[in-house]
Image: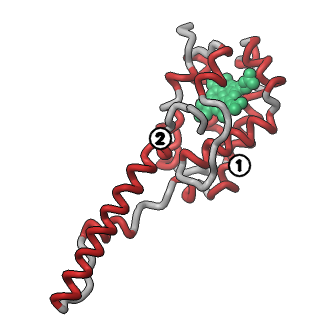
Amino acid sequence: MASAACLGAGCGLSTAFAHKEEAMNVRLIGVSIALALGAPLNPPAQAQQTASPKTALYDRLGGLKGISLVVDDFIDRLVTNKTLNKNPAINAGRKSSPAPYLKVQVAQLMCEVTGGPCKYTGKDMKSSHAHMNISEKEWDIMAAEFKKSLDKFKVPAAEQNELFEIVGKTKADIVVSKS
Ligand code: HEM
């Protein structure tokens, strides 16, 4: 994502990669020693753990197809929400960023931060929302609409919690109004 606030899963990617490399090195050393000693090739416990990581949230959500369905439904709810549209800047945002565009951008972002292969190329969360003076109350409405979409597509509670944790990391950049 452009100079965006880091949303979660994507933030740790380079570190995760470095750890993977380390584990591979450990494994290679282990294999060489095992070969030298004529021992069976049982990788060390650390390497075994690295070889079977937890499935990425992206895959558990059904990949880009699953994410697209949820985002499509979510943006439709967001842009038609009467309370949100009482905020003139949010209402105006529907014209400057039409729903189909928002769907593409949000799906790309969700794909990237859940560990998928996409690359988010939109604006960072602060500069794309600051002008709307979004309040805590508006954030809660957005979160409730998001939950409705997740429930509609039967996203399990564990995956919903992970998603809310990731999305929650953007709150400080998006909510600027105290009212
Ligand atoms: C109360 C909460 C939110 C409201 C009311 C809201 C509404 C909007 C609106 C109206 C725009 C278009 C702005 C414009 O063109 O002037 C926009 C852009 C965007 N929003 Fe939100 N949003 C909210 C929260 C979020 C969250 C939680 C995410 C993702 C984690 C998100 C992701 C995006 C993205 C990716 C864009 C497009 C950025 C670009 O143009 O490159 N929004 N949002």
Given the current orientation, which residue lies at the most extreme bottom position?
38
Residue drawn at point x = 76 percent, y = 28 percent:
79
Quarter of image, ligand 1 = top right
Q: Is mark 1 within 8 Å of ligand 1?
A: no
- Which residue has dot 1 on it? 68
Residue 115 vs residue 148, the one in the foreground: 115
Percent x, y of residue 14: 43, 50
Return the mark for residue 51: none
Report the Cα–Cα distance between label 1 and label 2.
19 Å
Residue 156 point in image, percent of width and height:
54, 51
Which of the 4 image quadrants contains residue 150?
top right
- Which residue is identified by label 2? 8
- Asked whether disc 1 touches disc 2, contact meaning CB atoms under 8 Å apart, the reply is no
From this view, report whether residue 156 is shown above or below residue 91. below
Quarter containing the C terminus: top right
The crowding category of the residue bearing disc 1, from other C-alpha atoms within 10 Å (few below 14, some 14 to 19, many at least 20), is: many
Look at the image and tell me in which quarter the N terminus lies. top right
Secondary element under disc 1, as helix, strand or loop, is helix
Residue 39 in the image, given as x and y percentages of width and height = 19, 89
82 over 179 or under it: above or below = below
- SS state under label 2: loop
- Give the class, few, some or many, for how many residues have Cα within 10 Å of label 2's Cα (few <14, many ≥20): many
Residue type beneath disc 2: Gly
The residue type indicated by label 1 comes to Ser
Task: Please indicate, yes or no, whether residue 2 appears anywhere in the rendered image.
Answer: yes
Q: Residue at x 68, y 44 (%)?
A: 107
Q: Which residue is drawn at 78% across and 37% down?
A: 101
Left or right of residue 33: residue 147:
right
Marks 1, 2: nearer the viewer? 2
Relative depth, front residue between 105 and 158: 105
Q: Residue furthest top?
A: 179
